[in-house]
Image (cartoon, rainbow, N blue to C red):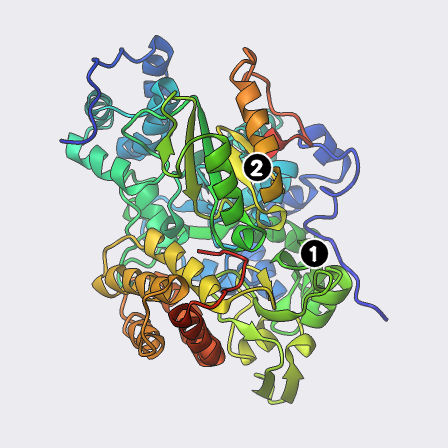
Amino acid sequence: MPAVERPVIYANLRKPGYTVDLDCYLKHGGYEALRKAVAMKPEEVCKEVELSGLRGRGGAGFPTGMKWKFLDRESGKPVYLVVNADESEPGTYKDRQIIYKDPHQMLEGVAITAWAIQAKQAFIYIRGEFIHGAKLLEAAIAEAKAKGFLGQNILGSGYSCDVIVHRGAGSYVCGEETGLIESLEGKRGYPRIKPPYFPAVLGLYNCPTIVNNAETLAQVKHVLALGGAEFAKIGVPGDSGTHIWCVSGLVKRPGLYEIEAGKATFGELLYDFCGGPLDGRKFKAIIPGGSSTKILKFGERFKGKLPGGTEFDWALEDIPLDSNSIAACGTGLGTGGTIVMDDSVEMIQALSNLNAFYAHETCGQCTPCREGSLWLSRVSGRIAKGGARESDVPLLLDIANQVAGRTICAHGEAVAWPVQSAVPKFKDEYLESIRLRQSGEPVPKLKLI
Amino acid sequence: MHGPSSSAPARALKPETLAQAPVIIARYPQRRSATMPLLHLVQEDRGHITQEDMHWVAEQVGVAPMQVLEVVTFYPMFRQAAIGRRHVRVCRTLSCALRGSYALMEGLEKALSCPRGETSPDGDFTLEFVECIADCGCGPVVHVDGAMHENVQAEDAEKFAAKLKATLKDPSYGQHPPVPGTPEWNG
């Protein structure tokens, strides 16, 4: 049977004539899950989310229920909910759809989550570039407040929660939850060191704070609508629900595909959903889950054991689309932002493109990341543009190894992982790129840096 | 504080900008959180942020002016210098690059007579490469002022530039509310 999509998050927003206004959302059963939630005790709502096995959709895949459990409820300080709608991982464009086409779906998740953690104030930190998206959310919040779904005395429960839309201003590192919190406090987006600054204990204004991705909150709505146990039946054990695959780059039909976790493979995603490579081309490599995840090469074999003990031996095309399977192949599902490269791509240029991104986005706090990202960008840049030595290839790896694990936040890993994964797999091609430039021979036409 | 300064003294902020500040500040549990919203507000009013503006924001949110400058210089969207009448931002990051954003940029540089990172001598265009703007399946994408333009192919650079030039003579440019299904919807 061919793999099919299973739209849950995108089910309504793809319907012709579906609009962003509250009436349309209510016609599609909107805010019923919230009604259900406020009739339950907050801890019961948390329990349902824990039972659902929902994992965060912001890239790290941390279990949402467990994150909520870390919340310090005894501090006596106000609790805050922060929505991470700062979608900025290269290759990822799933939250944009929710914000622009179905904002109430996310807001319902916000209201449910706020109730569950008893937050009286929620913030939506949205990308600065989503100018109209921010306006749409503000309009949707006003509508929801007028009907008692947000704001004062939500659905007559006596519980109140206000929501503020806060625009970022183009910084990638503000997608990191503690960097985001600093930014929300009106400062530079310098990530904080953990411990002690675990947001659930010392978050926004040093108060207990839950930071969840925009899609995660939309998923929470469905957890409540279905019930945790029912939700857990979607997908596979260890990874429940659907994943939205954001495919970009060199395929026939790039786009967004919502697939039940583990119920299709990369082969099905790239050939059946995306129509395969462009005419006359061959697939070469993919970055599976946003630019920070490790690259996979076509033709590789992936062997090992899954967390349950099952042995596997897969080609790239065979890898099932769930977090555990993808992690077992040495990379990550991340945000589901799959960037596809074919045989027209010179791999050093692709790497150099990403290195330039990370060098631009490092916040500069930690020396290994600040210096390392810049060095990686310069060294890969001179391989791609000419003027490199053969020793520059191992040098890339050497620099990357000195960044990962030595920084306050995961930007260090994001800098290092593309290099650490790509250099061993494409070393020979990089050396060939150096030779082509030294001998003045023609280089591939597609320019990436 | 230092930074690019213009020769003519900057005009005062609009009364509606000044009036909005207390409303924005009142939303937040702590005043300092209003720093970025106020900077966005100022930039929408003037097109860029001056030293005087930073002093004003600092006073509003109760921090030293240096603490506002720190914010302005950290975030790529805030700018201290004036830009052209149209702000053209081409996505540079991998997904768009794979779809030809470098060739598109070269085409736009020629067609708009404006090197990347600069403003054209006539002040019509500021042309920049920016990092990923989260519309990766429709690359190359170009963000012009508030509006997103998807699938702008390198071979159409001249046509696209002509379209942008035509907007310079359109008095209603940027005044329409966003309409679903149009590029601006995605901006």
The residue lying furthest to the right in this view is A1
At x 44% / y 71%, what residue is drawn? A436
- Report how far apart the C-alphas of labels 1 and 2 lie in the structure: 30 Å
Going by the image, does A139 lie left or right of A292? right
Which residue is denoted by mark 2 in the rendering? B157
Q: Nearer the viewer, mark 1 or mark 2?
A: 2
Q: Quadrant of the C terminus of chain A?
A: bottom left
List x then y, in percent, for residue A252.
Answer: 71, 57
Q: Quadrant of the N terminus of chain A?
A: bottom right
Query: Eyeballing the image, is B55 above or below B33?
Result: above
Residue neighbourhood size for the residue with mark 2, other residues' Cα within 10 Å, grouped as few (<14), some (14–19), many (≥20): many
Q: Chain of mark 2?
A: B
Asked whether B58 or A235 is in front, the reply is B58
Could you tell me which secondary element the residue under label 1 belongs to? strand
Which residue is denoted by mark 1 in the rendering? A257
Going by the image, does B176 lie left or right of B46? right
List x then y, in percent, for residue B22.
Answer: 32, 19
Query: Eyeballing the image, is A101 above or below B125?
Result: below
At x 67% / y 67%, what residue is drawn? A261
| Res A395 label | none
Could you tell me which secondary element the residue under label 2 belongs to? helix
